Amino acid sequence: MKHYADLHMCPPLDDAANARSMVDVLNGLETTVVGLVVPPDRLTPPSPVMNSFRDSGLDVVKRLNLKPRSREELLRSLRKFRAMYEIVAVSCCTQSVSRVAVRDRRVDIVHFPKQGHGSSLQRNLANTCRAAVEFNMSELTEGSGYEAGLGRLRREIEIAAEASTQVIGSTNASNPFELRAPRDVAAVLHMLGLPLEAAMSGVSEIPLAIVERNRLRMNEPQLEEGVRIVRRPAHEE
Amino acid sequence: MSRNWKKASELSGGPHTKNRNGHRYLLVRFLTEDPAPAQAIEDAVVRSIEHMFGKFGAAEMKVRMIGVDPVGDKAALRCALRSVEKLRAAVAMISRVNAQPAAAMVIRSSGTIRALRVRIQRRQR
């Protein structure tokens, strides 16, 4: 069975009824891993929303959304919060932030929002991008400027595909009406110009690999990236 | 003498296809605040397809609503075999049905209507 992930969900953390409705919908989909946006001051104790997601059998990962205004602010936030979260996403609102975010290996996901000057995926950024570029369904289903939004996303996906940058699709859902089936999100990415296999990976293999890598990193913080403990000497066990 | 005829599956869209008529059936769940009438659901699907692919694209996709379940939250849609991804994308873009917030998601895809294994009322034509 294929596992799917939606790494961007931002329900209100105190609204248990909303969370229950979202869980009901998610149970009918094939999503098994969800990324829940949790601000640093709400990390402990776990919010009721997180508990209700976990109780329904979903694998919940904590996600931090950073919206730094400068390079320094980004680096400061990464130093402070990286170890607390399984997923760190950066919203690239300025060129200086984009240049650092795409290259820093502590950043898992970069997102280029609609608004703001210089906030789009350029070729030079895509070529050096270590993080996955995220596209949210909410950008297309909400608000005005549908055609312009489609055109922008299409252009960015073309650039990402040319540079072999990883692309992931998420919903950015805050209520049940914003949820979508992961396979449908992949179909939208495919329609925007991504090859079907890459689009399917963008809702399954790539997000799952990000979560797995970061969990390994959180369990063994002293190890370098990619190093795994296979076994320990008997006297240490 | 060996005949060099193509298999029906090859003619109807590629090696992965089994159905001969070149159609694909999708079971779509519509999440709405109040149950929506079948006509409103069909309108929302058609509007989304035309918004995304235009009238010409819609004609190529050959989408038809086969039926809705009595509760009104699921609908079976048929489309041309090569348009499955387009229909999935159009369904994902639906955010309003009957002027109310809504979500639509494909919960099953099949080559035959029987395989959808749901009891849906055939629409009266």
Image (spheres, coloured by chain):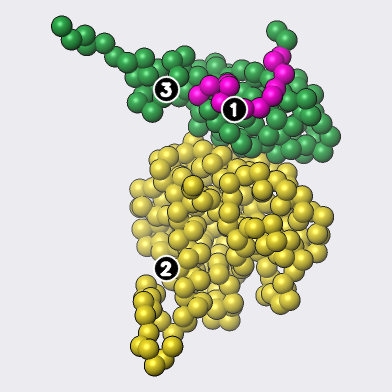
Chain colours: A yellow, B green
The answer to if A188 sits in the magenta stretch is no
- Give the x, y percent position of residue A184: 56, 39
Q: Eyeballing the image, is B124 above or below B75?
A: above
Q: Secondary structure at mark 2?
A: loop
Q: Quadrant of residue A73?
A: bottom right
Q: Residue at x 58, y 33 (%)?
A: B108
Q: Quadrant of the N terminus of chain B?
A: top left
Determine contact: label 1, label 3, CB under 8 Å: no
**Front residue of this view, candidates A18 and A109:** A18
Discs 1, 3: same chain? yes
Tell me which segment is drawn in magenta.
B111-123
Q: Residue at x 70, y 22 (%)?
A: B120
Chain that bears disc 3: B
Say which residue label 1 marks: B116
**Front residue of this view, candidates A52 and A205:** A52
Residue type at tag 1: Leu
Say which residue label 2 marks: A103
Residue type at tag 2: Arg
Q: Quadrant of the C terminus of chain B?
A: top right
Nearer the N terminus, badge 1 or badge 3?
3
Q: Quadrant of residue B68?
A: top right
Residue type at tag 3: Lys
Say which residue label 3 marks: B18
Q: Residues within 10 Å of mark 2 (few under 14, many from 20)?
A: some
